[in-house]
Image: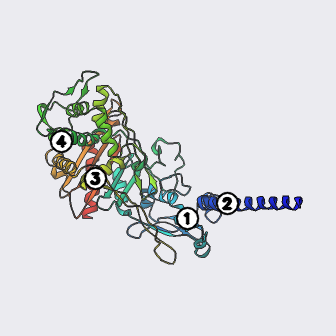
Amino acid sequence: MKMIAKRGIFLWILSILFVVGIIFLTVSFTTHGTEWAMQRYNRHLYSNGELIGAGTIYDCNNKVLAETVKGKRVYSKDADTRESTLHIVGDPKNFISTGVQATFESKLTGYNLLFGFYNIDRYGKGNDMKLTVDSDLCNYAYNLLDGRKGTIGVVNYKTGDIVCSVSSPSYDVNDVPDNLEKSEKYEGVYINRLLSAQYVPGSTFKLVTAICAIENIPDIDSRTWVCDGGYTPSHGVEIKCNADHGSAVNFKDALAKSCNSVFAQLAIELGDDKLSETAKKLGIGSAVTVSGEIKSFAGKFKVDGAADDLLGWTGIGQGETRIAPISMLRIVSAVANGGEALSFNIVNDFANQAGKALNITLPTNKTKLMDSETASHLKTMMRYNVTDHYGESRYEGLNLCAKSGTAQIDEYDDHNIAWFTGFMDDADNPYAFVVVIENGNSGSQTAGPVANKVLQKLVNG
C-alpha cells in the first residue's frame, strides 16, 4: 500500500509539472511567438537576410513604394522615390530601424498566433499597408536639400498625419554606392534625421523659453529690456547677441529679432526649475511616438543647478540641449492647435490580399502641452515674426507663423545648423513643418526658402 501511495504521489507531481510546463509554454508562445516567428532564419520571410514575405506598401495616392514579386522584395520603379522614401519604408536588411518595414514587420507579413503565415502560404506575401505620406511631395522636398545633410517634415496638425518626411543623405536601394559605409558624404545614412538626429536647437528653442515666460511672468508684454549687442550675467561670460537691438526691446520684438540678450535674461529670471518644468511638459526628454510603434530620440535637457551663463545659453538654444526635429514639429503643431498635440501617424490602414481592410487599431490621442491662451499668445508672436521680420512676400499666401534658428557648432558660420519651423494658420491647409539643414549658415536664409517651396508645392501643386 505504501508503494502504491508513493507512486500515486509521484504521478500527481508529474501531472502538476506537466500542467505547469504547458502553461509556461503557452504564456511564452503568446508573449514571444511573434518575435520567434520574425527571426531572420525563417524562410517564409527572409532570403539572404532580406525580407521577402511582406505585403505591398503604398503612399497616400496608392503609388507602390515596396512590394513582393515572385518571392523577391522590390521597390518603387522610380529612382527618386526609392531615394526620398528610403527612411520611411526602410532598407532591405532593416538597418534603418525606424522604417515601417522593420517596425510593422509582423503586420506586413500577416503573421498571427492563430493562423501563423496563412497569408504568405496562400498568396505568397502578407498584408498591404497604406501610408499617409505623399511620395511626390517627398521627392520634391528631398531634391530641395540638394545633397545637403538634413531633414524636412510636414504634418497635418488637425489629424496628426505626416504628409512629408525626408532625411538626407539617402541612397537608392537598387544602386547601392560602394562607399556607403566609408564616405563622409553618407555619414549617418541609416539615421532618419527627422526622428533620430540629436541637434542643437538654436533659436527655435526660444519658443520654449517664450512659453515658459508667458506662463510665469504676468507683465511679460509690458516690459522692456536693454540689448547693446550682448548680455553679461552676474556669474559667467558674456552672451553675445546677433545685433545691438537698443534700450527698449519688448517681448514681441525680442522673439522676432531673435534677441539673445533678452532671452538669456528671461531664462536666468525664470530659473532652472521653471525652464525644466516647461521643457518636460512640452515633451523634451520624452520620445515622440509615431503610429504607436516608431519612437524618436527623446531629447536631452538638463539645467539643474546651472550657473547663470549656462542657463542663459540654454534659454537661447545654445546650451547642452539636444532635440530631434520631430520634437520641435510636435511643439509648433500644439501651438497651431490651441495647445493640444495630436499623436503623429504615418500609417493609414492595412488590408489583406483579398482586399479586406484589417481592424488594426493605431493609437490616437491628444496631449495638452500648453494652455490655449498661451498657444494663442505665441501664435500671434510667430505670425508677427513673418509679417514684420522675415517678410510676408517671401511666403506669399501661406499665412505663415514661424521661427528660425541658427545653431552655432563652432566659430565657422558655414558649420551652423539652419532651422526653420512653424505652421500655416489656415483652416483649409492645417500644416506644421520643420526644416533642418546641416552646415546651413542662417536659418531664415537657408532653411526658410526650402520650407516655403515645400508648402507652396503642397498647397498649390
Image height of 115 relative to 17, above or below: below
Residue depicted at x 30% and y 38% = 202
Q: Residues within 10 Å of mark 3 (few under 14, many from 20)?
A: many
Q: Which residue is mark 1?
A: 73
Whole-number angstrom distance, CA of label 1 to CA of label 2: 34 Å
Residue depicted at x 30% and y 30% = 311
Q: Which residue is mark 2?
A: 25
User: Quick one: quadrant of the N terminus?
Assistant: bottom right
Res. 85 image quadrant: bottom left
Residue type at mark 2 is Leu
Foreground disc of the pair 1, 2: 2
User: Quick one: quadrant of the C terminus?
Assistant: bottom left
Whole-number angstrom distance, CA of label 2 to CA of label 3: 46 Å
Nearer to us in this view, 282 or 46: 282
Q: How many marks?
A: 4
- Mark identifier at residue 334: 3
Is 18 left or right of 63, judged from the image as shown? Answer: right
Residue type at mark 3 is Ala
Whole-number angstrom distance, CA of label 4 to CA of label 2: 63 Å
Residue 386 at x, y = what percent? 18, 48
